[in-house]
Amino acid sequence: MWNKKRVTILVVLIACFGLPGLALAGPTQEEVLKSISDNVGESVDPSKFMALGAAVLGMVILMVVLNRRKPGTGPVSRTLNHSGKLMKEVSTALNLKPTEVKRLKSLATDAGVSSPLVLMLCPSALKQAVDRRAAENP
């Protein structure tokens, strides 16, 4: 039932967690009362509390100023949605040649579509644009 491994683990656990608590003697009642009376008699320095209060007030003011900044100001306000960059990325991902991109742009302007990306993403719009061009140029 009790093998050597379990007994060794139990002895190690008792030695690590049980014995140090017994070895440390807590302060006596007289020592506690003496410490309390010594600390109660000391005067309080208000400059420490004022410094802490000023630091907290400064942090609050800093947070208010940072939160009142207008969104879009500062270094984050660069243009994130640029249709030309997106068109270039999509055309390289699809391995389109520059002539094919030019054809898509001309189809988009003829069809009245806002961007050639619409034609790439929507096959039905591309078919309608090609059919219109074919009807105009027989």
Image (tube, rainbow, N blue to C red):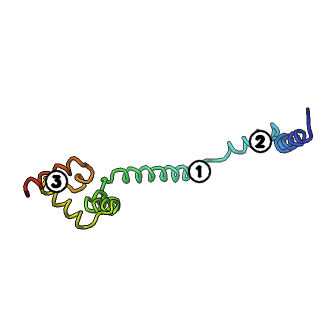
Report which residue position mark 1 lands on: 45
**Residue 117: where, in percent of width, then height?**
25, 55
Which mark is first along the chain, 2 or 3?
2
Which mark is first along the chain, 3 or 1?
1
Helix, strand or loop at label 3? It is: helix
Nearer to us of marks 3 and 2 is 3
Horizontal side of 127 relative to 39 (left or right) equals left
Q: Local crowd at mark 2 within 10 Å, few (<14), some, or many (≥20)?
A: few
The residue lying toward the viewer, choosing from 119 and 2, is 119
Up the image or down, 78 lies above or below 21; here it is below
Horizontal side of 115 relative to 77 (left or right) equals left
Q: Quadrant of the N terminus?
A: top right
Amino acid type of the residue that numbered disc 1 sits on in the rendered structure: Asp
Amino acid type of the residue that numbered disc 2 sits on in the rendered structure: Lys
Gap between marks 1 and 3, in whole Å?
Answer: 85 Å
- The reply to whether residue 24 is visible in this rendering is no
Helix, strand or loop at label 2? It is: helix
Find out whether the residues at labels 1 and 3 contact each other: C-beta distance under 8 Å: no
**Residue 97: where, in percent of width, then height?**
27, 66
Q: Which residue appears at 19% of the width and 50% of the height?
A: 127
- Furthest residue toward top: 1
Amino acid type of the residue that numbered disc 3 sits on in the rendered structure: Val
Gap between marks 2 and 1, in whole Å?
Answer: 22 Å
**Residue 17: where, in percent of width, then height?**
82, 42
Report which residue position mark 3 lands on: 130
Residue 75 is marked as none
Find out whether the residues at labels 2 and 1 contact each other: C-beta distance under 8 Å: no
Residue 2: name its quadrant: top right
Q: Local crowd at mark 3 within 10 Å, few (<14), some, or many (≥20)?
A: some
Residue 34 is marked as 2
- Furthest residue toward bottom: 98
